[in-house]
Amino acid sequence: MFGLSTTAHKKHIQAVRRNLTKIASPELLPVCKKTCELFFGGMSVSEIEMHSDSHWAEIINDFVNSIKKYNQQSGYVRVFNPSKEKEGFDNNNTVIQITCPDMPFIVDSVVLALAKNGLAMQLMTHPVANVSRSKSGVLKSAGESGDDFKESWTHIEISRIVDIEKISEIQTALELVINKVTVCVQDWKSMLGKVEEAKNDLVVKDSKSVHGKQLKFIDWLLDDNFTFLGYQYYQIQNNNSESPIVANRDSALGLYRSEAYLKDVDFLIDKDYQIQRQS
């Protein structure tokens, strides 16, 4: 982890842990102390010193209490303006908390979503935590021997937003991002299998030379040179319907399995018919 060996990092970690001892519940104190180490491990000293050690203790205590129970099959997103009365601390920024199973593309996708909404990010830390949870999703420990489920824990601060509706929109947008990434990662191997099937079904139509190039191109795609985001099988029907192409929804993988994505897909107009939900 970045910076944990520096004297300054150790000094802040020790100070935050002392403050956590005063405010964290006994059952969550060990997790809070570990969270401090995880949060600061990916931050520069200048980033840590954006807040006082006591303030970081309040942030971490609230974070752990927020994620102590959630559905591990999905994710947890919270966007809010902290207040002393409700969360136990104030902050000049709007805070975003995200917890989900550790997956590729999570951090980049979240950052892109914030940029798309024109939001200025002031601070971010996104460690991966080894945790143990009960079957109902209750957090039992973090960073202990035997904790083998990896979760992405993210704390972000953006320039303060006072519009409550805007805060709700941001939270919904980030929840959709987590959903999209989840289905893509879950179905990744299945989508590769569909490409393999297509390769095996490919027949020689023009020449053996062209066929060979086609096979090489597919092999290149499969060799980690392309990120497959969605798959869906379409059937062609010869009738008088508005569109001769019909999607087989049962075949959907990746983004095509995400209702969040399908709501955003525009109709694509062809010369004689409309194709819906095809990218």
Image: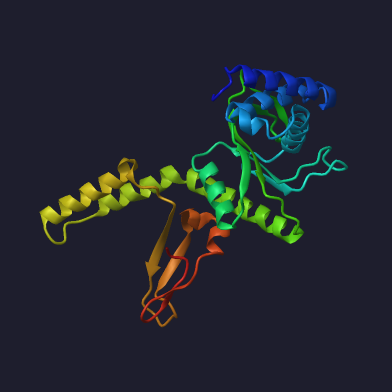
Front residue of 32/205: it is 32
Q: Split into 4 quadrants, where in the image is the C terminus?
A: bottom left
Q: Give residue 49's position: percent from left, percent from top.
A: 68, 31
Please determine whether, in this image, residue 122 is positioned above or below residue 127: below
Please determine whether, in this image, residue 99 is positioned above or below residue 260: above
Q: How is the image coloured?
A: rainbow
The quarter of the displayed image where residue 98 is located: top right
Q: Give residue 239's position: percent from left, percent from top.
A: 39, 80
Q: How many marks?
A: 0
Front residue of 184/118: it is 118
Furthest residue in direction right, as rendered: 85
Relative side of 228 to 90, left or right: left
Q: Split into 4 quadrants, where in the image is the N terminus?
A: top right
| Residue at 58 percent of width and 18 percent of height | 6
| Residue at 60 percent of width and 33 percent of height | 151
The quarter of the displayed image where residue 206 is located: bottom left
Q: Is residue 130 visible?
A: no
Q: Give residue 168's position: percent from left, percent from top.
A: 71, 56
Please determine whether, in this image, residue 25 is positioned above or below residue 152: above
Q: Is residue 225 visible?
A: yes
| Residue at 76 percent of width and 29 percent of height | 57
Relative side of 22 to 38, left or right: right
The quarter of the displayed image where residue 172 is located: bottom right
Q: Give residue 50's position: percent from left, percent from top.
A: 68, 35
Front residue of 58/208: it is 58
